[in-house]
Amino acid sequence: MSLPNCPKCSSEYTYEDGDLLICPECSHEWKEGETLEEVVQIKDANGNLLADGDTVTVIKDLKIKGSSSVIKVGTKAKSIRLLPDATDGHDIDCKVDGFGAMKLKSEYVKKA
């Protein structure tokens, strides 16, 4: 019987310990048939990791769709909520000072 490779590091040297499979190279433990879920990490324009509740600052003038208003550079968005499964690239849900609730792309903000 052949054991599956480690889902975390792809090592072929896995072994069984009771009902668990263990990788000796990265110490990952899992049950057979269990899959490793990818954790999506959202980063700002400078590469800093963002988390729910952070405050971010806009780094570029952003036009608001359907309006003649513009969000200026330096505008803060408080208490952000991350949307890791956003398909349109707008992965931050927040309230922008003076504009209200909206979604932003993480590539146009930096952590404050």
Image (cartoon, grey):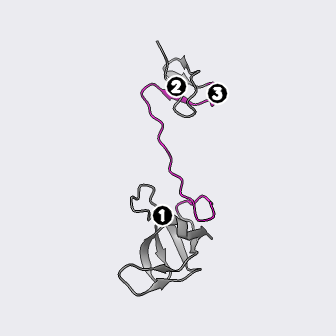
* Residue 54 is a magenta residue: no
Which quadrant of the figure contains the C terminus? Answer: bottom right
Instruction: Tell me the distance, in whole angstroms, between the alpha carbons under discs 3 and 1.
Output: 36 Å
User: Does residue 98 lie above or below 111 as drawn?
Assistant: below
Q: Dot 2 corresponds to which residue?
A: 5
Q: Dot 3 corresponds to which residue?
A: 25
Please state if 34 lies on the left or on the right of 15 as rendered: left
Q: In the image, residue 51 lies at what x, y percent?
A: 55, 59
Numbered range of the magenta stretch:
24-52
Amino acid type at circle 1 is Arg
SS at mark 1 in the image: strand
- Neighbourhood count class around disc 3 (C-alpha, 10 Å): few under 14, some 14–19, many 20 upward: few
Relative depth, front residue between 78 and 59: 59
Amino acid type at circle 2 is Asn
Asked whether the viewer can see residue 36, the reply is: yes
Instruction: Tell me the distance, in whole angstroms, between the alpha carbons under discs 2 and 3.
Output: 11 Å
SS at mark 2 in the image: loop
Asked whether the viewer can see residue 98, the reply is: no
At a point 53% along the width and 18% down the height, the residue shown is 16
Q: In the image, residue 66 lies at what x, y percent?
A: 35, 81
Residue most extreme to the left: 66
Q: Dot 1 corresponds to which residue?
A: 81
- Answer with the quarter of the image where residue 54 lies: bottom right
At a point 47% along the width and 84% down the height, the residue shown is 70
Q: In the image, residue 12 lies at what x, y percent?
A: 56, 23
User: Does residue 107 lie above or below 7 as drawn?
Assistant: below
